[in-house]
Amino acid sequence: MAFPKRTEASILGKIRQYTSKNSNITQKDMDHVNTLVEAYGKDWERIGQETDVSPRRAQRIWAQHQQRQKVTQAWTKEELETLRNCIRDGIGMAEASRIIGTKMSYACNAKMQSLKRAGLNNAFQKSRTLWNDDDVARLVHLVSTSKGGDIDWTAIGKELGRTAKSCHLRYTKLHQKHYNAKADHSQTVSCEVQKQYEQHQRVDWTNVAQQLGLSERECLEANQFNDGKARWVYDPDTFSWDTADRMAQFIKDNYPKPVPVNYTAVSNYMWTDKSDCVKMTSLLRGEITWTAEALALVVRLRDSGMKFEDIAHQLSPTVSASRVTATYHKQKNPHVYQPLLDTDRQQIKDIMDTRAHYMDFADLRALVIQSMPNANKSALYTFVDSHGAALPAYKERLKNSNVEHIASQIMSGTKQSVLAKQMGIPSLMLTNLMRSRTFSMHSRTWTQEETDKLIEVARASPGPFNWKSISEEVGTKDPKQCRTRYFNVGHKY
């Protein structure tokens, strides 16, 4: 045997690979298939027999021929602008080729690399120019809106058309300049505040600002005198929303998002301990840290008979009772999720399939749960609901009902669980119904008003495009539709 280490099937496969007529698609093959399509239409079985290839292969040859008919060699300004938008939003060559429609993916890849190199050269040239006020303002805004603790200087450099190193160095100088200016008058402000506090046992920040020729905010941020500041620990019996609203309003007026909050200024304004201001702000936002002491308190108060609403009020002014309830049950009944066994799944299917045509889903669900006392409750409920929504008997009930009337009732505020119980079907079916109706609301055609709204919202959004939020602003199109439409027509506005 010529190839002792190869199996017979492997050898035959390799022979077919080199002898098959389907190994490569030539221009002659594409022209032949296109002629047959013009003669017979899209009868791929007949065309495959004529060309001695499979019907699927014949269809692929024709599709490739059609694509090549649309391809152009020269790049127009509109296509280049669309490609630049794709580079900015991180879209790959295959998707860019689909969006443009007249260029193959390899051509898009080559042009992308060329544009990126040109962009780096332009950024290098711009990094050697002086920074103007607009560039500095955009730099500060992009840094302040960076998510997490790490700042992506490469992304910021692309937004500003400069190198990452240039942006980093400029921001470092701005940061150092800010703190040097703050340190210059920190001692002066602290001395004036101490003088007023010792004389009147309070601080008039308007007077301090007038005495030193600074703004009130600068004085609040610079002061380091902390004697006499009160503690602010949450107590449900003494908590005052007036005080909390006063602090929240100060933060809103002086540090609107995305400006980071200076808690030194907040502490001086409230004349309260700085760490207490930070903790109280977190509580007012609904944030709570479940420490061992907090969990023990929840369990102790609940075991003593206190309601979850009262327990929530003991922990925070804003935390919900449902969150405390979930935390309590998780603490009291810790368990690991266990999926249903195949035998249990089959038993559930048998019970539901034989009874669904004459039992309402609520009764059938209760019967299944009663017959499976040892199964994991979470997995059991999920499987019963999903299998019930797929049963033909319940689908028929929904089909025979007035779907439009049901949808209008749900949109007017009627609970889905109530309607589902009245109809005797799973509420999951109504959930899926409303989802499908919401999806079908997004038509594929664009009106001039929708296009104008898209352009306005997209250009007003800072930084990289968030197509989900943009689609919510437009209201009648999904994120993918908005992105494709903007790349196709955005350069014309």
Image (spheres, grey):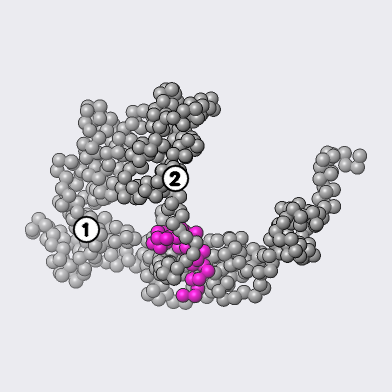
Question: How many other residues sit within 10 Å of disc 1, few (<14), some (14-19) or many (≥20)?
Answer: few
Q: Which residue is mark 1?
A: 249
Q: What residue appears at the point 19 percent right and 47 percent down from the top-left corner? A: 232
- Is residue 65 found inside the magenta-colored segment of the image? no
Residue 145 in sight here: yes
Q: Nearer the viewer, residue 168 or 365?
A: 365
Span highlighted in magenta in the image: 464-493
Q: Position of residue 144 (x, y in %)?
A: 37, 61
Q: Nearer the viewer, residue 84 or 259?
A: 84
Occupied quadrant, residue 427:
top left
Q: Which residue is mark 2?
A: 432
Q: What residue appears at the point 31 percent right and 39 percent down from the top-left corner? A: 323
Question: How many other residues sit within 10 Å of disc 2, few (<14), some (14-19) or many (≥20)?
Answer: few
Tell me the distance, in whole angstroms, between the alpha carbons under discs 2 and 1: 42 Å
Occupied quadrant, residue 174:
bottom left
Q: Is residue 300 above or below residue 97?
A: above
